[in-house]
Image (spheres, rainbow, N blue to C red):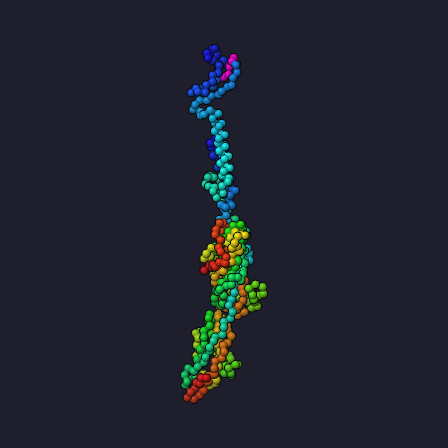
C-alpha cells in the first residue's frame, strides 16, 4: 500500500512537470531569422578640395616650381593640375597619386604657370579642384624663376 | 468448550482479540450463530481493521498533498522527484526574428573607399519570451549592398547599384556564404509586447567599402545584403536596452 501511495505521488509530480515543460525547455529553443533581414549604412560625401594652394620657385636661378596645399581628411592621394594659359582655364593633370602636402615639378620650359590641386579617396572619389595658385614664370636669364 | 469427540465438526467458536496466538475455527451448527471473527497470527501484521484505516489515512494525505502542491508555482517543482519520467529539452524552431534596416539612430561612422561604417537595424521578436542573439551569419564578400538616394531606401542611386557593384559589403564577410561572426556582447530582445522590442542596434564599423567604390556611391544610403542567419536561443534573460551598440570584430 505504501508502495502504491508513493508511486501515485511520483506519477502526480511527473504529470505536473510535464505540464510545466515550457519553462524547463525554453532556454534550449533555437530561434531563426526571417529571410531578407538586413541593415542600413551611409556613405560620406566626396572629399573637399584642398585649401590654400601655393606655388613657388625652388630656386630663383632654377627652372622648377614647388606647389603646397592643406591636407584633407581621409585623402589617400592628390592630383596636381597645371595651366600655362591662364588662372581660370587650360588645366590638365600634370601629376597624380601624390602623397603628402607638397609637390615639386621637373625642369620646366619658359612659360607662365598656374596650378590647382584636388584630393582623392580610394581610386575614384576625387574632390573638385582647388582655387588656382598665383602665376609663376620660368624665363631665361639670370633670374630664371619669378614668383608672383 | 469440550470436544464431543468430533473436533472437526462441532467446535464452538471462541472470540478473544487479546489472545496472542489466535486460531481460525469453523462455525458450529449446534450453537446460536454469532458474528465470526477471523484472526491472524501476530507475525502477519496488524488486524484488517487497522490496515483499512491506514489506507484511508494514506489516501487522505495523498489528496491533501496533491492539492497543496498544485498551488505552487511551477518553478518550485523538483524535477528530480519524478524518477524515471524525465522532461526532454527540445531544440525547436519557434517564431523567427526580423531584422530591419533603419536610419535612426544616425550612424556615427560613415563609409568611404577603403574604410568601414556603421550599420543600423531594429530587431523584432514575436515570441512570448526573450531571445538572445550571440552571432550573425553573413553572405559572401562579393554580395554587395544596393545604393539609394535617401535613408528611406526608396530610389536607387544610379551608378551605385549592387550590380555595379557598389563595393559595399558586410565587414569580415568571407568567400563562404553563412560565415558566422560572434557578437562582442549578446543581444537580448525582450518578449513580444514588452519594452525594448523592437530593439534598435548600431553595429559599429560592420559595413565595409573597398577602395574601388564608384564616385556615384558618395553620400549614398545602403541597404546591406540580407543576413543568412543568426545564432539565437529563447528563454529567460535580461533584455538589452534600446538603442544599443554592438559589433563583431572578426
Residue B137 in sight: no
Q: Residue B83: image x %, image y %?
A: 46, 39
Q: Nearer the viewer, residue B102 or A41?
A: B102
**Residue drawn at 47 percent across, 83 percent down:** A135
Tell me if I can see residue B37 in this picture: yes
Magenta-drawn stretch, dominant element (helix, strand or loop): loop
Residue A118 on the magenta span: no
Q: In this view, does B155 lie above or below A28?
A: below
Q: Position of residue B89 (x, y in %)?
A: 49, 46
Say which of B94 and B124 sits in front: B124
Question: Depth check: A95 or B20 in front?
Answer: B20
For the image shown, how many numbered marks are present on the structure? 0
Residue occupying the far right of the picture: B155
Q: Where is residue B108 in the image (x, y as percent from the top left)?
A: 49, 64
Magenta range: B26-31
For image coordinates 51% across by 58% down, the residue present is: B200
Residue at screen point 45% across, 75% down: A70
- Extreme-top residue of the structure: B4
| Quarter of the figure with the C terminus of chain B | bottom left
x, y (%) of residue B163?
A: 55, 65
Amino acid at each position: 500500500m505504501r508502495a502504491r501511495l508513493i508511486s501515485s505521488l511520483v506519477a502526480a509530480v511527473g504529470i505536473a512537470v510535464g505540464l510545466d515543460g515550457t519553462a524547463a525547455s525554453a532556454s534550449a529553443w533555437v530561434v531563426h531569422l526571417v529571410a531578407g533581414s538586413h541593415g542600413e549604412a551611409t556613405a560620406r560625401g566626396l572629399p573637399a578640395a584642398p585649401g590654400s594652394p601655393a606655388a613657388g620657385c625652388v630656386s630663383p636661378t632654377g627652372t622648377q616650381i614647388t606647389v603646397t596645399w592643406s591636407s584633407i581628411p581621409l585623402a589617400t592621394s592628390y592630383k596636381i593640375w597645371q595651366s600655362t594659359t591662364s588662372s581660370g582655364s587650360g588645366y590638365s593633370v600634370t601629376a597624380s597619386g601624390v602623397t603628402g602636402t607638397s609637390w615639386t615639378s621637373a625642369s620646366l620650359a619658359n612659360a607662365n604657370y598656374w596650378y590647382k590641386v584636388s584630393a582623392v579617396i580610394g581610386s575614384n572619389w576625387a574632390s573638385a579642384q582647388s582655387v588656382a595658385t598665383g602665376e609663376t614664370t620660368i624665363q631665361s636669364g639670370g633670374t630664371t624663376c619669378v614668383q608672383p | 468448550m469440550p470436544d464431543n469427540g468430533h473436533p472437526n465438526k462441532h467446535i464452538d467458536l471462541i472470540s478473544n482479540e487479546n489472545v496472542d496466538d489466535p486460531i481460525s475455527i469453523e462455525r458450529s451448527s449446534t450453537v446460536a450463530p454469532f458474528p465470526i471473527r477471523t484472526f491472524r497470527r501476530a507475525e502477519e501484521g496488524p488486524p484488517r481493521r487497522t490496515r483499512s484505516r491506514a489506507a484511508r489515512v494514506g489516501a487522505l494525505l495523498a489528496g491533501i498533498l496533491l492539492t497543496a502542491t498544485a498551488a505552487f508555482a511551477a518553478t518550485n517543482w523538483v524535477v528530480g522527484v519524478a524518477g524515471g519520467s524525465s522532461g526532454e529539452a527540445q531544440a525547436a524552431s519557434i517564431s523567427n526574428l526580423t531584422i530591419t534596416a533603419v536610419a535612426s539612430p544616425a550612424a556615427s561612422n560613415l563609409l568611404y573607399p577603403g574604410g568601414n561604417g556603421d550599420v543600423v537595424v531594429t530587431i523584432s521578436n514575436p515570441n512570448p519570451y526573450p531571445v538572445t542573439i550571440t552571432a550573425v551569419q553573413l553572405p559572401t564578400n562579393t554580395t554587395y549592398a544596393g545604393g539609394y538616394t535617401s535613408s528611406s531606401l526608396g530610389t536607387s542611386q544610379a551608378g551605385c547599384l549592387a550590380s555595379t557593384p557598389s563595393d559595399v559589403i558586410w565587414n569580415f564577410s568571407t568567400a563562404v556564404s553563412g560565415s558566422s561572426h560572434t557578437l562582442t556582447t549578446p543581444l537580448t530582445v525582450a518578449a513580444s509586447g514588452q519594452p525594448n522590442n523592437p530593439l534598435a542596434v548600431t553595429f559599429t564599423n560592420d559595413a565595409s567599402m573597398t577602395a574601388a567604390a564608384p564616385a556615384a556611391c558618395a553620400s549614398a544610403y545602403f541597404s546591406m545584403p540580407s543576413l543568412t542567419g543568426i545564432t539565437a536561443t529563447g528563454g529567460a534573460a535580461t533584455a538589452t536596452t534600446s538603442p544599443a551598440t554592438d559589433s563583431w570584430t572578426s
